[in-house]
C-alpha cells in the first residue's frame, strides 16, 4: 500500500510474502481488501486466485476461504451486496463448474449457488465487470453466454446469472477483446482491442446504450486509438483512456488521452506524451486527480515507477503537470547582512527566495531565526526582541515602515521578484484566504508561515523577496546587524 498523495510506502500494510503470482484486480469493501489474479498462495497460505486481506495490515483474512478456488486466472472482480463477482478464464470454482463468471459469498468465499450462469461465457475470457441499473455487465473475448451468441459484451441478472435478453449487442465488438467497462448515465463505455462495434468502425473505444446495447452514434471518437486500450475512467466532462497506442483520431497521444464524454472528440488540451512509449493498464479518478498505473518509469522526464497522479485542472482535459511524489524545493541565501544601523532608525535588506513546487494545493513558506531567537545578531550591544507589529502591506521596496514609536527589533514583508505585491493567484497571507496584508511581525526561533500560495501553478519557479527590516533601539550603539535565517517550504494541506 502507498500513500495516495505522497506515493510513499505505507509500512503498516505488510503482506509478508504476498501473492506468488500477479494480482490483476482488487477492491476494498466491508473492511476487507479482495484480490484476484493468477496466484495460488498468499503469505504462504494456499489461495487459488482469490483472497481477502486486511486493508490496514495486509494480513490474510482466514475466514474468507475459497477452497480450491478458481482453476485458472481471475482477471476481474466486483463486490456488491454481499457477493464477490469474479470473471476470468477459469472453468470451475471450488470443484463446481463455472465458465469464466461466478459469484461467491463475500464473507466466507463459498460459491453462491443462486448465481448460476449455466454454460456461462464460452469462446474466451471475461476481462471486465460493471454493475449498474440492476444489470451485471460482462466484457471480454467470449462469443456466447449460456448458449446464446454474445460477441464480447453481455448483461446478466446480478442475482441469478441469467442472460438479460433486452441487452443485445448483435455482432458486438469485433477484431479484438473488450477489456474495461464504465457506466455513466444511460451509456455504457467500453474499451479494448476491437476495431468495430455492430459493424461500425470504432478504434478500441465506443459507447453503447446501457439498456439495449445499441451503438451510441453520438459518441464518435473518429478513428479512435491506433493500439489497444486497457482502462477507462470518467469525470463529468471527460472520458480518459489508457493503453498502448501512439495516436488517437490521427493526433499524437502516447498511451493516455482525454476524450469529450459526450461526443468522443479528442481533447486538444491533453498532453501528447507524458509517459513515453509505455503501456497504461489502470486508471481511476478521485479528489481532483487521475490515478495512472502501468509500465511507467518517468512522467515528463521526472522519474516515477509504475504509478503517477495527474492533476485534473479547471480547464479542458488534464494538466500535463504530474503531481507524482509531491515536492517543494527552495533556493535562498541563509546568511543575511543588514549593514550598519544607527540608533532609532531602520535598515532594510532583501532575501531573494525561489520556490519550485508541484503541490496541487500550493505551498506555505516558513521562516525562522536559526541563531538566537531574536532574528538577528548585533556586532555591538544586544539585539532587541521582535516587537514590531503587523501593519498595512506595501508595494514599494525598500519598505517604508513607520520610524516613529517605541517599536524596535526585526520584521519582514513579502513581495515578488519585481518588488511588487504577490499576485492574488498565489495569495499574500498565511492561508488560502489570501489575506491582503503582506507584512508580518518579527521572527523567532519558532518557524512561522510568512507566505502561502493559493494553488499550484504549472511547476514554474515562484520568485519571492523577503524584505528584512532591523530597527535599533534608541539606546542601541551603532553596529552591524547580521543573522542566519532558515527558509523552508511545505505543501499545503487539503
Image: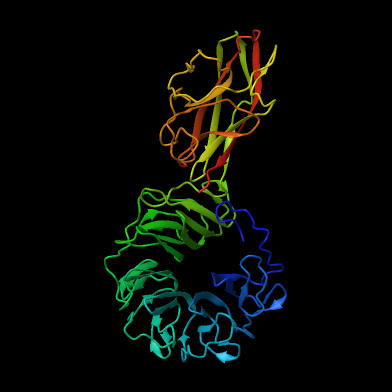
- Quarter location, residue 336: top right
Q: Is residue 477 above or below residue 409?
A: above
- Quarter location, residue 340: top right
Give the residue drawn at x 60%, y 54%: 305
Q: Which quadrant holds the N terminus? A: bottom right
Q: Position of residue 419 (x, y in %)?
A: 46, 22
Give the residue drawn at x 64%, y 80%: 63
Q: Position of residue 242 (x, y in %)?
A: 46, 61
Task: Pick out the residue farthest to the left.
Answer: 218
| Left-right relation of 248 to 467 | left
| Count of marks overlaid on the render | 0
Q: Position of residue 262 (x, y in %)?
A: 30, 61
> Foreground: 459 or 178?
459
Give the residue drawn at x 43%, y 69%: 192
Q: Is residue 272 above or below residue 121?
A: above
> Foreground: 453 or 345?
345
Q: Is residue 240 above or below residue 473?
A: below
One can see residue 405 in this view: yes
Which color scheme does this rendered protein use? rainbow
> Foreground: 173 or 312?
312
| Left-right relation of 399 to 410 | left
> Foreground: 101 or 82?
82
Q: Position of residue 92 (x, y in %)?
A: 56, 88
One can see residue 246 in this view: no
Q: Is residue 141 above or below residue 456?
A: below
Amino acid at each position: 500500500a502507498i500513500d495516495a498523495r505522497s506515493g510513499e510506502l505505507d509500512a503498516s500494510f505488510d503482506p509478508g510474502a504476498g501473492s506468488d503470482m500477479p494480482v490483476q484486480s482488487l477492491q476494498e469493501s466491508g473492511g476487507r481488501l479482495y484480490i484476484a489474479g493468477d496466484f495460488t498462495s498468499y503469505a504462504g497460505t494456499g489461495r487459488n486466485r482469490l483472497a481477502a486481506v486486511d486493508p490496514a495490515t495486509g494480513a490474510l483474512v482466514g475466514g474468507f476461504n475459497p477452497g480450491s478456488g478458481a482453476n485458472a486466472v481471475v482477471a476481474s472482480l466486483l463486490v456488491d451486496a454481499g457477493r464477490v463477482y469474479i470473471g476470468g478464464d477459469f472453468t470451475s470454482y471450488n470443484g463446481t463448474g463455472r465458465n469464466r463468471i461466478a459469484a461467491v459469498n463475500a464473507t466466507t468465499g463459498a460459491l453462491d449457488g443462486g448465481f448460476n450462469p449455466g454454460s456461462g461465457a464460452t469462446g474466451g475470457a471475461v476481462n471486465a465487470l460493471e454493475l449498474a441499473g440492476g444489470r451485471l455487465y460482462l466484457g471480454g473475448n467470449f462469443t456466447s453466454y449460456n448458449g446464446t451468441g454474445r460477441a464480447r459484451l453481455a448483461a446478466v441478472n446480478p442475482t441469478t446469472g441469467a442472460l438479460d435478453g433486452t441487452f443485445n449487442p448483435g455482432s458486438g465488438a469485433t477484431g479484438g477483446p473488450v477489456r474495461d467497462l464504465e457506466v455513466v448515465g444511460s451509456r455504457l463505455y467500453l474499451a479494448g482491442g476491437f476495431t468495430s462495434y455492430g459493424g461500425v468502425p470504432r478504434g478500441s473505444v465506443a459507447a453503447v446504450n446501457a439498456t439495449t446495447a445499441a451503438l451510441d452514434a453520438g459518441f464518435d471518437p473518429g478513428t479512435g486509438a491506433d493500439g489497444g486500450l486497457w482502462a477507462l475512467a470518467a469525470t463529468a466532462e471527460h472520458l480518459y483512456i489508457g493503453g498502448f497506442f501512439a495516436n488517437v483520431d490521427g493526433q499524437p497521444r502516447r498511451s493516455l488521452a482525454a476524450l469529450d464524454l459526450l461526443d468522443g472528440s479528442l481533447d486538444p488540451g491533453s498532453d501528447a506524451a507524458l509517459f513515453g512509449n509505455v503501456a497504461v493498464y489502470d486508471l481511476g479518478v478521485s479528489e481532483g486527480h487521475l490515478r495512472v498505473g502501468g509500465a511507467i518509469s518517468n512522467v515528463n522526464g521526472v522519474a516515477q515507477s509504475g504509478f503517477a497522479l495527474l492533476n485534473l485542472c479547471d480547464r479542458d482535459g488534464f494538466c500535463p503537470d504530474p503531481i507524482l511524489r509531491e515536492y517543494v524545493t527552495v533556493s535562498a541565501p541563509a546568511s543575511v547582512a543588514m549593514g550598519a544601523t544607527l540608533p532609532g532608525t531602520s535598515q532594510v535588506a532583501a532575501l531573494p527566495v525561489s520556490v519550485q513546487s508541484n503541490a496541487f494545493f500550493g505551498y506555505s513558506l516558513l521562516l525562522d531565526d536559526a541563531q538566537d531567537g531574536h532574528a538577528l545578531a548585533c556586532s555591538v550591544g544586544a539585539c532587541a526582541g521582535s516587537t514590531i507589529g503587523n501593519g498595512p502591506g506595501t508595494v514599494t521596496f525598500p519598505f517604508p515602515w513607520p520610524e516613529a514609536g517605541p517599536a524596535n527589533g526585526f520584521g519582514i514583508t513579502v513581495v515578488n521578484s519585481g518588488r511588487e505585491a504577490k499576485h492574488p493567484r498565489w495569495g499574500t497571507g498565511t492561508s488560502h484566504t489570501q489575506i491582503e496584508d503582506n507584512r508580518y511581525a518579527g521572527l523567532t526561533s519558532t518557524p512561522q508561515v510568512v507566505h502561502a500560495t493559493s494553488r499550484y501553478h504549472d511547476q514554474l519557479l515562484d520568485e519571492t523577496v523577503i524584505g528584512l527590516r532591523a530597527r535599533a533601539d534608541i539606546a542601541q550603539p551603532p553596529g552591524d546587524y547580521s543573522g542566519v535565517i532558515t527558509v523552508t517550504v511545505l505543501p499545503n494541506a487539503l
